[in-house]
Image: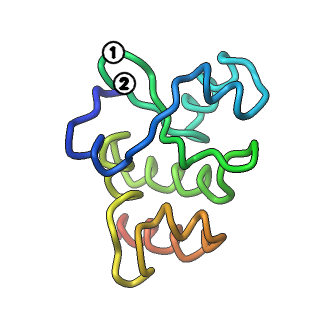
Amino acid sequence: MTQIDRDTDALVGDWLTINETAQALGVSPNRIKQLINDHKLLGVRRSGVWSIPAVFIADGEIVKGLSGTLTVLADCGFTEDEALRWLFTADDTLPGAPIDALIANRGTEVRRRAQALAL
């Protein structure tokens, strides 16, 4: 895991700590760490503290399609910081950022674009 850069930090906006994420999902902090290790959730260090983008959690669950998208991006060789930048950077073909499409339940489109990055 890497220390996040300022540009990516600005793209993401609101963040949750591991404890806040655990509380939002109703699981233990250790479970959040395992989800991060398994590429089911993305966490990075910000000022020495593990942080997860708040938008990744909705209605007490991880946004549908996020885990699969993170796996595809990891398989493409993306670092955590690169994956965050990709998820939060606007894509005119979606339209909006990939995370917006995931939230709108358009995960198949997002994963297709992520898979195309490997080609």
What amino acid does circle 2 point to?
A: Arg
Residue 98, relative to residue 39: is it above or below? below
**Residue 3 position within the rendered picture, expressed as x and y whole percent measured from the top left:** 28, 26
Q: Secondary structure at mark 1?
A: loop
In the displayed image of the protein, which residue is found farthest to the bottom?
A: 93
Of 68 and 64, which appears nearest the observer? 64
- Dot 2: within a 10 Å radius of its alpha carbon, few (fewer than 14), some, or many (20 or more) residues? some
- The circle on residue 95 is none
Circles 2 and 1, Cβ within 8 Å, touching? The answer is: yes
Q: Secondary structure at mark 2?
A: strand
For the N terminus, which image quadrant? top left
What amino acid does circle 1 point to?
A: Gly
From the viewer's perspective, tell me whether residue 12 is left or right of residue 65: left
From the viewer's perspective, tell me whether residue 44 is left or right of residue 24: left
From the viewer's perspective, tell me whether residue 110 is left or right of residue 64: left
The residue depicted at 22 percent of the width and 36 percent of the height is 5
Of 58 and 29, which appears nearest the observer? 58
- The circle on residue 45 is 2
In the displayed image of the protein, which residue is found farthest to the left?
A: 6
**Residue 67 position within the rendered picture, expressed as x and y whole percent measured from the top left:** 61, 49
Of 111 and 54, which appears nearest the observer? 54
Which residue is denoted by mark 1 in the rendering? 48
Residue 68: image quadrant is bottom right
The residue depicted at 53 percent of the width and 42 percent of the height is 54
**Residue 70 position within the rendered picture, expressed as x and y whole percent measured from the top left:** 51, 50
For the C terminus, which image quadrant? bottom left
- Dot 1: within a 10 Å radius of its alpha carbon, few (fewer than 14), some, or many (20 or more) residues? few
